[in-house]
Every structure is written in C-alpha cells, then in structure tokens.
Image (tube, rainbow, N blue to C red):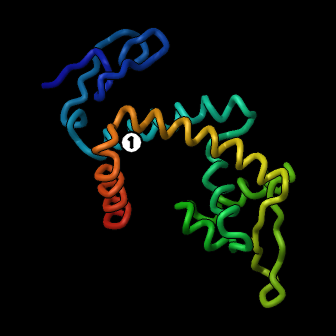
Amino acid sequence: MVRRKNGPAGRTKGADGGANGNGDAVDYGPLADWVGFNLRMAQAAAFGAFSRLAKEIGTRPGRFATLMLIGRNPGISQTALSRANGRDKSSLTPVLNDLARRGLVIRRRTRADQRTYRLSLTPAGRRLLGELTRCAREHERKLDEIIGAKEQKAFVRVLKRIIAQAG
C-alpha cells in the first residue's frame, strides 16, 4: 500500500499543508501511479497556476481558450467553437453570454440560417486576449521549466494522442 503525506506528485494539499486538508497521510492506492488520475491532478495544478496569473488582470482563465479560438477564427460558429474548445454547447452558451455582456465578443446571426451565430472579438476582446496571451506565455515558460525543453514536444505528442484516441 502506498501512503504519502503529500499528493501523488509530491505536492501537499490543503490549507494546513496536509494531503487531505487536516494533516493526515492519504493512501492513494493505485491512483498514485494511474495516468488518468495524475493527468487530472496535473491539469488542476496547471489550471490553478494560470488562474492566479489571469486573476491579476481581472478575468477567469477559462475564457482564454474561447477568446483565442474566436480571435484566430473570426466568424466561427458556436457549434464549431464548442467542438474546438471541447465544450458542449450548453456549457459554452453562458461563457459567450458573459463575454458578449462584457463587450468582448460580438454575435452575428447568419443570413442563411437565423439560428446560427458567427462570433468575432471586439477591440476590447482583442486587448484582453493580448493580456491573457502574455500571461499564458509566462505560464508556459514555467511549465517548460518543469517538463524540460527536451521532453516538452514528446509530452505534447502524448497528450494529443490521448485526446485523439480517448476523446
């Protein structure tokens, strides 16, 4: 049985430094060595680190990918955006409502199909995307330090293979 004071990747958890929030060791059992669990924990750690950077400019990090995809694909439909972003349309709609309310995204109905919206960034959306991109680049540099320059490309290839084959 594997018992660790720290999280599976050697990271303590909880406000008081304990693995489960109260200082007790946690038995992760087979989770400690399972790819899926460690992938989820790594994603949570990376997202948390990016959240702290994005919070400094007053936004939520989950908006970054949405803004980037719209910015790189002006006129993208909500359906294409939901596929590219890995979100279903029902979870993407509140995000787009928020971005439109804040004056960052414009929705335009298409003439051919009034049910379809095309999305583009406003000037304010482009400015925010620029700020978030700077945060993301800083975050990526930190991740590169953790992963190592030699391993980064191979690591991303493996992640893409997981996305393609398990998704």
- Vertical arrangement, residue 144 with respect to residue 64, above or below: above
Q: Nearer the viewer, residue 160 or 91?
A: 160
x, y percent for residue 130:
71, 47
Q: How many marks?
A: 1
Q: Is residue 56 left or right of residue 24?
A: right
What residue is drawn where x is 58% and y is 42%? 136
Residue 119 found in image quarter: bottom right
Residue 32 appears left or right of 15 = left
Relative placement, left or right, of 11 versus 92 is left
Position above or below: 106 against 112: above
Please state which of residues 111 and 56 is positioned toward the viewer in this rendering: 56
Disc 1: CA contacts within 10 A as few (<14), some (14-19) or many (>=20): few
In this view, which residue lies farthest toward the left? Answer: 1
Who is closer to the viewer here, 23 or 65? 65
State whether residue 100 is above or below residue 6.
Answer: below
Q: In this picture, is 94 found above or below 14?
A: below
Name the residue rendered at 70%, 29% in the picture. 56
In percent of width and height, residue 36 lies at: 30, 46
Q: Amino acid at mark 1?
A: Arg
Residue under numbered circle 1: 40
Q: Position of residue 64 (x, y in %)?
A: 64, 49
* Residue 38: % across, % down: 31, 39
Q: Residue furthest front?
A: 150
Say which residue appears at 33% left-offset and 52% top-offset.
Answer: 153
Q: Which quarter of the rendered picture does the C terminus lie within?
A: bottom left
SS at mark 1 in the image: helix
Residue at left offset 38%, top offset 42%? 40
Work out which quarter of the rendered image holds the N terminus and state it: top left
